[in-house]
Image: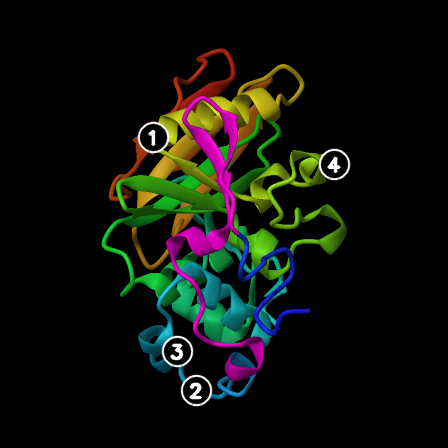
Amino acid sequence: MSDYNIRGLVHDANFRFKLAKEIYWTPLNAMGHSGHTNMDFALLINETPHQIQNLISCPYEAFQYLNAINFEEAKDVYYKTENNVNWEYHIDGLTAIRNKRGCCTSVASAATFLLSKCFQKMGYIFFVRPDTSNHALNYVYHRNKYFIFDASAYTYGQLDYVAIENGDINSIKDKIITSICFETSSLYDFVKFHKRVHLYNSHRFLYLSFPKSDNCLDRISLKKENNKLSVYLPKEKKFELLDAVDEMQYNFCIV
């Protein structure tokens, strides 16, 4: 076994598999190969997050580090009611690294913190299901392409459901589809693909993108009433709607 391989990631993987129009499955190393072994990062666990940030040069290394510190899944959100809105507050990336734990938005923010000096253009894709459950992904813009990946899959995703980077389409079956790295020319094309794969009781998801920030999602409020989901975001939060909202399912609010 390679001293660089970690979870589903394969250090020397080399493939580019077409999944759909303008959507390709590529290894995470398409954004840069790691120059450090897993043991190298294990020996650096007592360094400060900012020292590690200066060391990391690609996403692969970011996940080697997060695995080295045993970053764990945890529901680290907290709630506060303001002006009759019950806000769900999320943790920033630096705090998540120091805590070595967090939910999907926390580990996505942690990955962005670690990579913030590597790429000029990064951000998040956030999707909400009709039952109010949700998930966050990272994206990086590199060599005129978007690379989209799920930080939680590479950090604490259940190994039985995480795909191995081998370029074999059969290995994706029964695995979490976002446990692979996607290459695309457009975030909209990724959303179209994801919608086809993840039909949820015949309902559409709500897809948003957020630009690079210390906190993927500082706060949000989700409330379901009469089969309609209300989504609240603070007015200072920059975002882009990646898919049209079905007014019979969603009530989208900026407050």
**Separation of marks 4 and 3 at Cα, in angstroms:** 35 Å
- Which residue occupies 23% across, 54% down? 120
Observer able to see residue 234: no
Q: Quadrant of the C terminus?
A: top left
Q: Which mark is residue 174?
A: 4
Residue 75, percent from left and from top: 60, 57
Q: Determine whether 34 is above or below 156 in the image.
A: below
Q: Are marks 2 and 1 in contact (CB under 8 Å)?
A: no
- Residue highlighted by disc 3: 52
**Residue range (magenta):** 14-40
Q: Are marks 3 and 2 in contact (CB under 8 Å)?
A: yes
- Which residue occupies 57% across, 41% down? 178
Tell me the SS state at disc 4: loop
Q: Residues within 10 Å of mark 1 (few under 14, many from 20)?
A: some
Tell me the SS state at disc 2: loop
Tag 3: residue type?
Ile
Mark 1 or mark 3: whose residue is earlier in sequence: 3
- Residue highlighted by disc 2: 47
Tag 4: residue type?
Asp
Tag 1: residue type?
Ser
Determine whether, in the image, residue 175 is placed left or right of residue 185.
Answer: right
Q: Residues within 10 Å of mark 4 (few under 14, many from 20)?
A: few
Mark 2 or mark 1: whose residue is earlier in sequence: 2
Q: Which mark is residue 186?
A: 1
Mark 1 or mark 4: whose residue is earlier in sequence: 4
Mark 4 or mark 3: whose residue is earlier in sequence: 3
Tag 2: residue type?
Glu
**Separation of marks 1 and 3 at Cα, in angstroms:** 31 Å
Tell me the SS state at disc 3: helix
**Separation of marks 2 and 4 at Cα, in angstroms:** 38 Å
